[in-house]
Image (spheres, rainbow, N blue to C red):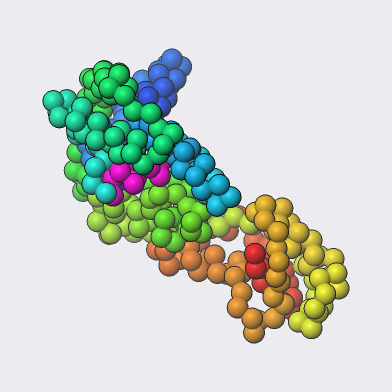
Amino acid sequence: MRTLCVIGNGIVVHLPGLFEEIDGLESNGISCKERILVSDCAHLLFNFHRVVDGLRESELANSFIDTTKNGIGPCYSSKVIWNGIRVCDLRHMDTFPQKLDLLLSEAAARFQGFKHSPDMLREEVENYKRFAERLEPFIADTVYVMNECIAQEKKILVEGDQATMLDIDFGTYPFVTSSSPSAGGICTGLGILPRVGDVIGVVEYEVLPGWQCDISSIRNYFDLPKAARQYVERIEELVGIPIHYIGVGRMMPLYTNDFLISLLGFVQWVSHVLIGKIKLLISEKCPVIGIYV
């Protein structure tokens, strides 16, 4: 039995990119016929969303979020203010041009650098007429499909791309994505009721040497043990942000590795945690240092 790939209602779909991937697979002898379903309720991500993404980043100057500039944020913005265009709208090309014109006009009114013309609208409508015809065999009521698969006890694997720390609600806001790739997104993004069994969370970490001495009274960074300084400097290297404050006692508020694991448990409803290496990051007697950026 071949795997069925479902693009759920919680996804925003860039059709040129989707067809490019399909063409790439089929050129390598992998047939996508009857193997991919796209939700009729998924929202369409247009090329102009990408332009708007870049213009917004330019406006923010030094406060920019450093998005992928793939238009994901602007597309979800269209979705939540009720003027987005969904896959099902491709079945109604009589009203499609008016809906797209509204989106383009709003973008032009909001951003001075965005140029909107009747020719742009006409060209995009023609493109999406062709896309609609090609996409039609893939369009489905994926909520029904998913729940039928559950009723038939088929195995389902859900990908929460980027996961907890980029979740719009539970991630490192504002440096997050625009949707809910945590376990809760299974319900809203696929229409599956919260009756899932085990949810496996994977925790990955890097092993660093520890230290045994008490550091609670140290007030000078260079008086810390070499291993402690290497720990701090490695975090700076990984996150690309200088660390300004270091807590050296449990009396101080800390964000440590156990915080992230707790967050994983609460937000993702994780029932089992898989740890890649069973090895202590630091010894039990070693005080944990808190990092403040």
Foreground residue, 167 or 273? 167
> Looking at the image, is 247 positioned above or below residue 195?
below
Q: Quadrant of the N terminus?
A: top left
Instruction: Answer whether residue 107 is visible to the viewer in this image.
Output: yes
> Looking at the image, is 189 positioned above or below residue 231?
above
Instruction: Answer whether residue 67 is visible to the viewer in this image.
Output: no
The total of numbered circles placed on residues is 0
Foreground residue, 183 or 155? 183
**Residue 42, how many percent across, how many down?**
27, 39
> Looking at the image, is 59 positioned above or below residue 208?
above
Q: Residue at x 64, y 81 (%)?
A: 252
- Left or right: residue 248 versus residue 27 is right
- Residue 74 part of the magenta-drawn span: yes
Q: Quadrant of the C terminus?
A: bottom right
- Residue 269 part of the magenta-drawn span: no
**Residue 117, how many percent across, how many down?**
31, 24
Q: Residue at x 51, y 59 (%)?
A: 172
| Magenta region | 71-80
**Residue 258, how many percent across, how many down?**
57, 69
- Left or right: residue 181 versus residue 219 is left
Foreground residue, 23 or 59? 59
Q: Residue at x 86, y 73 (%)?
A: 223
Q: In which quarter of the view is residue 43 placed?
A: top left
